[in-house]
Image: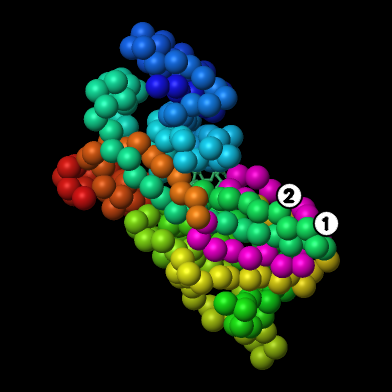
Amino acid sequence: MNFAVVSRGDEISEAKKKQAIEHLQDHGYTYHEESPDTVIAIGGDGTVLQAFHTYKQRLEKTAFIAYNTGHLGFYSDWDTVESLLEAVVDNSLIMVEYPLVEAVMEEEGVSKTYLALNDVTIKGVKGSVQIDVHLNQYHFESFKGDGLCISSPSGSTGYNKSLGGAIVHPSLEMIQLSEMASINNRVYRTIGSSLVIPKHHELTLVPKADAYMVSVDHESFQPDTICRMKCSVAKQRIRFLRSRSFPFWNRVKEAFISLNDCEPRGTR
Ligand code: NAD
């Protein structure tokens, strides 16, 4: 098996990276940064996003493992790097697949496709932004406010959660549209709730501003012009190698409520 390790670059993550490489090489695995079968991300959720974007061209051939060395590692489910390495060598991991967001941005005849593990956002550069929202090619609403966030199920606990969106189990194939501070008055009116959009539907955003910022996970940029942005559940999925015993709702509780009194590990 070929493997690679992506580290956040701090002292602790680098030490764990060295330990992981040595341990796996001692057990006959090959370190191969160009074409790994398994990628271990050591750091925080930002490191998982970095690892995903490094290897997004070969998602069908790559599985990811997240090990947290920071405060909150939502994607991680390991207590120690030793237990993670033992599970890799024992082949006792289970593979889970999570949906991704696809955003196709049409810029004056040219279209560019982006994949997000967490979310895509569109915001104003100077103040609020106006965006026409279409569902399956029908106009749904005209939004005015700080911006819009389109999240995947596993990204629903990120920015989407801060915007009051729902937390979604990653077994559901959907994307979620959440508003950032919409202006609602006699002139501008939006639904005010997050919308859950299924796999076979398409969301199209038509921004009306001259300048806006787009983010795809941890990366932000200011496109020249976007005529429209079509968002949907991507055909590709990300594969994680996970511990058998850390159900999604336990991770949600441990991350956001308390470390105690979780459902016993081993249930799902
Ligand atoms: P960052 O350094 O600003 O950290 C953002 C925080 O979000 C970190 O605590 C991280 O652990 C957490 N996070 C990231 N993905 C998560 C997920 N799927 N579930 C739960 N928590 C998650 O930025 P970063 O580490 O580069 O991550 C980029 C992500 O940050 C974006 O994709 C977006 O979801 C999130 N974000 C959140 C807000 C907000 O909540 N107000 C604002 C901007 C970005």
Residue type pointed to by label 1? Asp
Q: Is residue 43 magenta?
A: no
What's the magenta region? 216-234
Q: Position of residue 95 (x, y in %)?
A: 32, 40
Q: Which residue is mark 1?
A: 224
Q: Quick one: 153 or 187, which is closer to the camera?
A: 153
Instruction: For marks 1 and 2, give the one nearer the viewer.
Output: 1
Residue at 58% over, 34% down: 54
SS at circle 1: loop
Residue at 58% over, 70% down: 203
User: Mark 1 near mark 2, Cβ–Cβ under 8 Å?
Assistant: no
SS at circle 2: strand
- Any mark on residue 221, and which? 2
Task: Name which quarter of the figure residue 83 lies in.
Answer: top left
Q: Is residue 224 magenta?
A: yes
Q: Quick one: 217 or 101, which is closer to the camera?
A: 101
Q: Position of residue 150 (x, y in %)?
A: 55, 62
Residue 259 located left or right of residue 64 = left
Query: Is residue 240 depicted above or below 214 in this figure?
Result: above
Residue type pointed to by label 2? Phe
- Any mark on residue 44, and which? none
Residue 165 seen in the figure: no
| Colouring method of the image | rainbow
Residue 116 located left or right of residue 12 = right
Residue at 67% over, 84% down: 188
In the image, farthest residue toward the bottom: 186
Residue at 46% over, 49% down: 237
In the image, farthest residue toward the top: 26
Count of picture labels: 2
Q: CA distance from mark 1 to mark 2?
A: 10 Å
Query: Is residue 262 depicted above or below 130 in this figure?
Result: above
Query: Is residue 182 depicted above or below 147 in this figure?
Result: below
